Image: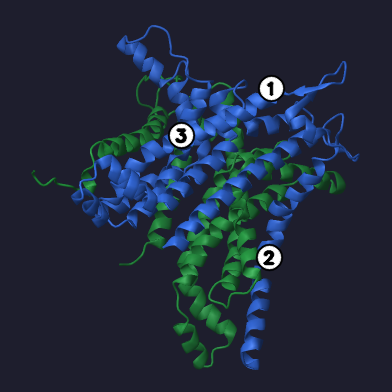
Chain colours: A blue, B green
Amino acid sequence: MSAREEAETRRDARNTWLLSAPALVILTLAAAGPLLIMLVYSFLTPGDYGNVVWKFSTDAWVGTILSKDIFDGTYSLADAHLTIFWRSVKLSLITTLFTFIVGFPTAWFIATRTARTRTALLFLITIPFWTNLLIRTFAINQIIRNEGILNTFLIYLGVIDTPLVIIYSDFAVFLGMTYVYLPLMVLPLFAAIDRFDMKLLEAAYDLYATRLQVLRKVVFPIVRPGIVAGSILVFIPSLGAYVTPRILGGGRNMMIGNFIELQFGQGRNWPLGAALSVLLLLIVAAALVVYIRATSRETSNG
Amino acid sequence: MARREFSASRIPGFPTVAILVFVALYMPILMLVIYSFNAGDSIAIWEGFSFKWYPVAWNNEQVREVTFRSLTVATMASVIATTVATMAALGTTRRRRTGGQTFIYLMINQPLMVPEIVTAVALLIFFASIKVATGYQGLGYLIAAHSAFCIPFAYLPIRARLEGMDRTLEVAASDLYATPWQAFRHVTLPLLMPGIAAGLMLAFVTSLDDVVITLFVKSAGQDTLPTYMLAQIRRSVSAEVNAISTLLLLLTVILLTAFFLLTRKRD
């Protein structure tokens, strides 16, 4: 490398940092930095009226899964917490699976249309994705609530006499999350299917593979990066969901997000809330590592 | 044995599922819009067509106040986010890759990876200390938080636009004795403008839609339109919320259409 090239490389590096500095400052102050402070808070003692007392304690971390008996001081598994964790993981997994089951045929359908139809259909999928999540959840609420559109309609038709109680249940939360996160599954699946060479299907078919075999042995392995991406994109926001369980799950069907909020409200246990947030972040990080591994192996293979 | 026909576009069941998905995606939104024109109080029983909920919403002092606050925050945050994202995009594309770029890229995309509730809690903790220390309770916290999570939304379309631009015109400009600033101002910036406009729109929509982070960061009496609506949904529901939602939907669709037209590949 000549001296001139070296100087240019140095200048480029300096400009990269200088130009990125304002963005990095904002992100450090109002996004990444506070995450570290939150980590510190998870090791402090809760104050009587919220906030914290600056005294080191691991109680919050122990308290994420164990509860201390107030009389004899023994520890047992905190059933209420575990129920909430389990509900969050279960609902997120079911949502991911179901969005895949209905998202795959949809993505396939879009990818096999003519260019003009395809653009239009993609736009139709993208609009709900960018519309306010609150409004979309509210729309579902209006349909399934006891005095909602569905019940009013069914009673009018005479199918039922008393309203179906759907809202404020795990099922309602599942329904809502499937509805709001479906575009996040369809878009990466579409991107993967769009690159898929349809001639491979004919080849497999000529060799007498059944439809199911074609899907399982030819299509799925090739579009796997899209499947993994879609699953991660649905799973992560589902696990951290706050608005959807609040509007459709009511007070009793909390997910981790609502449980975290509770610690900063009535619970008055900021360290526990901080510890739960760090825990959620770790699960998300693990999911991202799985994602990066799955997709990088894919590209290195061909 | 007869040769079996095969067509990728005709896998049985797939079109049916796809059509049902599109219907299911739009049906609830459509219902929401239809019932915003309901003459009755109910959100489920149709009592005839009426525009009455729109003036009701408009004449509601509180709705006006929170709408104005939402628009203020979204405007400030999207302008700040787009400005710093444009600079960062200029700094991280079309240059020799240096070690720092991966770090910068990771930092910029961080808000997309961390669950909103986690960022919200972290900001609540951090800003609570600052509020105590400085006594400042203003909109600055909301604007700072919104600017931060809007940066990746502004950055991505600008970066995409930059990567598609070659340096020929800029080199030509400097050959004609343009100073680096002149070349940037009269060549690079105009070419980059569609990307910047697209980024600004995405950032604006993202800020306008935020519920969770706003809920945790806002001081007392600083409701934005979404947090106000969240409280309304929990209490009684009148079609007033439908009217507000419909207007918000309309705004989003207009901005998105503009975004699509701006970023459309000319083929």
Helix, strand or loop for disc 3: helix
Residue type, mark 1 in image: Ala
Residue B60 visible in rendering: no
- Of mark 3 and mark 1, the one earlier in the sequence is 1
Residue drawn at x 51%, y 45% is A232
Q: Nearer the viewer, mark 2 or mark 1?
A: 1
| Disc 2 residue crowd, few under 14, some 14–19, many 20+, Cα 10 Å | some
Between A253 and A206, the one nearer to me in the picture: A206
- Of mark 2 and mark 1, the one earlier in the sequence is 2
Asked whether the residues under marks 2 and 1 belong to the same chain, the reply is yes
Residue B233: x and y in percent read: 55, 27
Residue A189: x and y in percent read: 39, 48
Residue type, mark 3 in image: Thr
- Of mark 3 and mark 2, the one earlier in the sequence is 2
Vertical relation: A211 (above or below) A166: below
Q: Pointers 3 and 1 in contact (CB under 8 A)?
A: no
The residue under label 1 is A80
Residue drawn at x 44%, y 28% is B52
Residue A178 circle label: 3
Q: Pointers 2 and 1 in contact (CB under 8 A)?
A: no
Residue drawn at x 72%, y 57% is A28
Q: Quadrant of residue B121?
A: top right
Between A219 and A90, the one nearer to me in the picture: A219
The residue under label 2 is A22
